[in-house]
Image (spheres, rainbow, N blue to C red):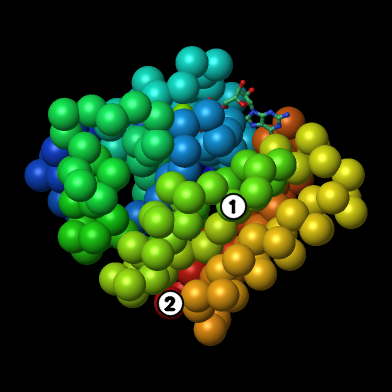
Amino acid sequence: MQIRKAEFRCSSERISQVPKDDLRDIAFIGRSNVGKSSLINMLTGRSGLAKVSGTPGKTRLVNHFRIDDAWYLVDLPGYGYARTSKTERSGFSKLITDYVLRCERLHFLFVLVDIRLEPQAIDLRFIEMLGENGIPFGIIFTKADKLSQTQARRSVERYGAVLAEQWEELPPMLVSSSEKGIGREEILGFVEECLKV
Ligand SMILES: Nc1nc2c(ncn2[C@@H]2O[C@H](COP(=O)(O)OP(=O)(O)O)[C@@H](O)[C@H]2O)c(=O)[nH]1
Ligand SMILES: [Mg+2]
């Protein structure tokens, strides 16, 4: 799939503000600094679409980008940076849980994790919440350029092994590097298939 048109549509502070049309959302989430904005820019081929920041935790809004007038790419707030007054007991903000658990626009969710790190408790808790609520999701490992191919493969296998302790079926797992453009075709191909369902 090629992306020809990518335009910022809106930022939502509350779930009531998200678009009301019938296009579907493909959303991206992860810990602050995982490389979410960079990945969104890489996938869309627009270097300035989502802001890339060295300072984690800045984005607290749900950002909708309209892609080829056919679907929305959704940039969700990062989690796991600082506890705010709006953080629910789950450890995730109300905006995140409202969107992920209650927004019918959501068609598929990609959870981003840094390929260099061993499975992080907050990501595992988030994934558990998705599994328990039947939210369709996949995992994208980011920053693959930081590891050799062998190390990257081991890291993905390790993640799969941890998930397999709890779940019978593993989610789709994709590897990416925004720096090197790795994973672009595979992720976009996956999104294309996803939108056919
Ligand atoms: N080496 C490398 N660094 C990356 C990659 N993606 C993001 N980064 C860096 O990681 C930091 C956080 O990236 P950003 O996209 O703002 O993360 P976000 O907070 O999840 O949106 C920035 O310094 C990026 O340059 C990648 O694929 N490879
Ligand atoms: Mg960001």
Q: Quadrant of residue 173?
A: bottom right
The image shows residue 184, relative to residue 6, as above or below, that is: below
* Residue 155 visible in the displayed image: yes
Q: Which mark is residue 119?
A: 1
**C-alpha span from label 1 to label 2:** 30 Å
The amino acid pointed to by label 2 is Val
Upstream in sequence: badge 1 or badge 2: 1
Rendering coords of residue 47 (x, y %): 59, 25
Is residue 172 or residue 2 the one in the foreground?
Answer: 172
At horizontal 59% and vertical 52% (from top left) the residue drawn is 119
Is residue 174 or residue 167 the one in the foreground?
Answer: 167
Is residue 103 or residue 84 the one in the foreground?
Answer: 84
At horizontal 33% and vertical 72% (from top left) the residue drawn is 132
Rendering coords of residue 69 (x, y %): 38, 49
The image shows residue 192, relative to residue 15, as above or below, that is: below
Q: Most extreme residue toward the bottom, as rendered?
A: 168
| Disc 1, SS | loop
In the displayed structure image, the side of residue 169 where residue 183 appears, left or right = right
Q: How many marks?
A: 2
Rendering coords of residue 191 (x, y %): 53, 61
The N terminus lies in quadrant: bottom right
